[in-house]
């Protein structure tokens, strides 16, 4: 039996933030990882996706400038782009593991599972700890349809040797919309199929419509209120059939219908840790129903968006709270979300839907930005922002942004909101001109 102060289960961004922080505070820490050191984000999530997006974004900027100074649109060389992605991702697991070893944090490779006596088994190793952190993340959810065994996931998409000429994406959430943008830019005919009339439900409805119009204009076959019921092999391809009886032939079908918590192998019931279908139940201190077991990141059942910076924030929170007495409950700052693509959709703080419910409190400034200098320069065809302003203070408290530059604008607004800056405060700063930051004074 090997004894530790803390054992972290899951070597993704959340688990690693906690492990390094607790180790720095003098704790004897071990990390267990069953698959790729580094977890989802750097191996098969945010980072590889954003490497592919670099080519997509560049193509989008070039397309917008056709007839405005550029004469050809760069084409994506999929194998070369995939090689560039792999040059990054191949180093992640080894580099992450060496970093832990160099820091003298104990590591165990294998699937962790709790025993009835409260200890942990990882392969041939038995571990015991004063406290445990479960940070096992989420994995793709495979819908129970006829032929579900033929469905692929974002894991396979982000490592495809060859992109088929025609692909079908089942679900238009973050993953579905982003993979649609990548495959479309790389020349594939994309069918993006969503079972309801309201994809990306957490985002502003008008801006989601604008984004889907852009994807349609780019040639994506967007079908709403359509349920795929069957996927069946058809020569070298697959035949997809919907509940309405429509069918088509496609090269690959990807389940992009959401993700589910990774808890099955852990045997959490043996240590009295309660779960729901959405993840591990925690209180305001990220403590589970077992006072010695904590949980963080994507695997937790909580309302915050499941994003890398959120997992890291929770890891840093546990670093502090597991090393101090009477820890306060976790308080999240505003959390920006971005759906990436040639046109990006971003959101932060009070949503336009919340603002509409309390019109006495909030005003929404809906601004068409296409004529603003920053977007004219880029010939951005879709630039629009909805800014939520607190009527009492005149401070910006939320925003929904659609443009090729939304990721930048939302981060600037994050600083504005976090620092409670008024437009007078913003106008007291000098930012480089002409940039997106110099637009900030004109939003409220
Ligand atoms: C395609 C895609 C794109 C994304 N893009 C973005 C983005 O642009 N921006 C963003 O902020 N977020 C993005 N995300 C989400 C982001 O990847 C996650 O929020 C983040 O990785 C969560 O970190 P985590 O540490 O909670 O879990 P993970 O990163 O999932 O790490 C959990 C680790 O635990 C391991 N594990 C599971 N069970 C066991 C066990 N029994 N024993 C041992 N180890 C175990 C897993 O192998 C995994 O390595 C994306 C996700 C996907 C799938
Ligand atoms: N840019 C980013 O920050 C980014 C990118 C990718 C993923 N992520 C994170 O990963 C999480 C998971 O993303 P996701 O896209 O897998 O899930 P999601 O929940 O965002 O979207 C899945 C969508 O599929 C729909 N759906 C469910 N069953 C379906 C079916 N049978 N047919 C068609 N549609 C169906 C759901 O209604 C939902 O709208 C996100 O919530 C986000 O936190 C973030």
Image: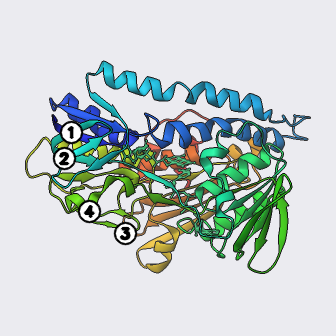
Q: Is mark 2 on a helix, strand or loop?
A: loop
Is there a contact, CB below 8 Å, between mark 2 and mark 1? yes
Q: Is mark 1 on a helix, strand or loop?
A: strand
- Distance of mark 4 from mark 1, alpha carbons? 18 Å
Label 2: which residue? 119
Q: Of label 2 and label 4, which has the lower sequence position? A: 2
- Distance of mark 2 from mark 1, alpha carbons? 6 Å
Q: Nearer the viewer, residue 113 or 182?
A: 113
- Quarter the N terminus occupies: top left
Question: Which residue is at 86% across, 37% downward?
Answer: 73
From the top left corner, tell me how far across and down residue 347 is, in percent: 52, 57
Vertical side of 279 occupied by 37: above or below: above
- Distance of mark 4 from mark 3, alpha carbons? 49 Å
Horizontal arrangement in the rendering, residue 387 relative to residue 151 (left or right): left
Mark 3 packing: few (<14 Cα in 10 Å), some, or many (20+)?
few
Label 3: which residue? 392
Q: Which of 273 and 427 is in front in this view?
A: 273
Label 1: which residue? 127
Q: Which of marks 2 and 3 is in front?
A: 2
Label 4: which residue? 269
Q: Which of marks 1 and 3 is in front?
A: 1
Vertical side of 19 occupied by 362: above or below: below
Farthest residue toward the top? Answer: 102
- Distance of mark 1 from mark 3, alpha carbons? 55 Å
Q: Of label 1 and label 3, which has the lower sequence position? A: 1
Is there a contact, CB below 8 Å, between mark 2 and mark 3? no
Vertical side of 425 occupied by 149: above or below: below
């Amino acid at each position: 039996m090997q004894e530790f102060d803390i054992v972290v289960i899951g070597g993704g961004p959340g688990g690693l933030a906690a492990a390094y922080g607790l180790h720095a505070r003098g704790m004897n820490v071990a990390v267990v990882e069953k698959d790729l050191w580094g977890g989802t984000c750097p191996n098969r999530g945010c980072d590889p996706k954003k490497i592919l997006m670099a080519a997509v974004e560049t193509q989008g900027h070039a397309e917008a400038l056709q007839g405005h100074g550029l004469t050809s649109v760069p084409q994506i060389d999929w194998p070369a782009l995939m090689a560039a992605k792999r040059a990054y991702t191949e180093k992640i697991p080894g580099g992450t593991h060496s970093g832990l070893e160099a820091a003298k944090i104990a590591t165990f490779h294998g699937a962790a599972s709790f025993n009835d006596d409260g200890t942990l088994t990882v392969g041939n190793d038995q571990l015991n700890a004063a406290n445990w952190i479960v940070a096992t993340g989420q994995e793709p959810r495979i819908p129970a349809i006829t032929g579900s065994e033929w469905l692929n996931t974002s894991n396979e998409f982000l490592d495809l040797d060859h992109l088929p000429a025609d692909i079908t994406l089942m679900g238009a959430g973050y993953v579905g919309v982003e993979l649609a943008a990548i495959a479309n830019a790389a020349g594939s005919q994309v069918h993006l199929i969503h079972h309801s009339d309201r994809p990306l439900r957490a985002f502003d409805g008008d801006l989601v419509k604008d984004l889907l119009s852009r994807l349609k204009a780019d040639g994506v076959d967007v079908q709403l209120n359509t349920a795929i019921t069957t996927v069946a092999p058809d020569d070298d391809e697959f035949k997809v059939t919907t509940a309405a009886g429509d069918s088509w032939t496609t090269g690959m079908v990807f389940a992009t219908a959401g993700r589910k918590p990774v808890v099955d192998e852990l045997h959490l019931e043996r240590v009295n840790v309660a779960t729901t279908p959405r993840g591990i139940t925690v209180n305001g201190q990220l403590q589970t129903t077992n006072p010695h077991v904590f949980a963080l990141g994507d695997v937790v059942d909580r309302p915050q968006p499941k994003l890398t910076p959120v997992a890291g924030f929770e890891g840093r929170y546990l670093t502090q709270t597991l090393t101090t007495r009477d820890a306060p409950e976790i308080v999240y700052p505003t959390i920006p979300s971005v759906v990436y693509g040639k046109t990006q959709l971003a959101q932060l703080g009070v949503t336009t839907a919340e603002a509409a419910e309390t019109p006495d409190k909030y005003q929404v400034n809906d601004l068409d930005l296409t004529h603003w200098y920053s977007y004219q320069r880029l010939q951005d065809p879709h630039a629009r922002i909805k800014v939520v302003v607190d009527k009492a203070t005149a401070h910006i408290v939320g925003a929904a942004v659609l443009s090729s530059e939304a990721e930048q604008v939302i981060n600037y607004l994050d600083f504005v909101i976090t620092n409670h800056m008024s437009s007078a405060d913003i106008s007291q700063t000098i930012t480089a001109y002409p940039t997106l930051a110099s637009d900030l004074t004109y939003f409220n």
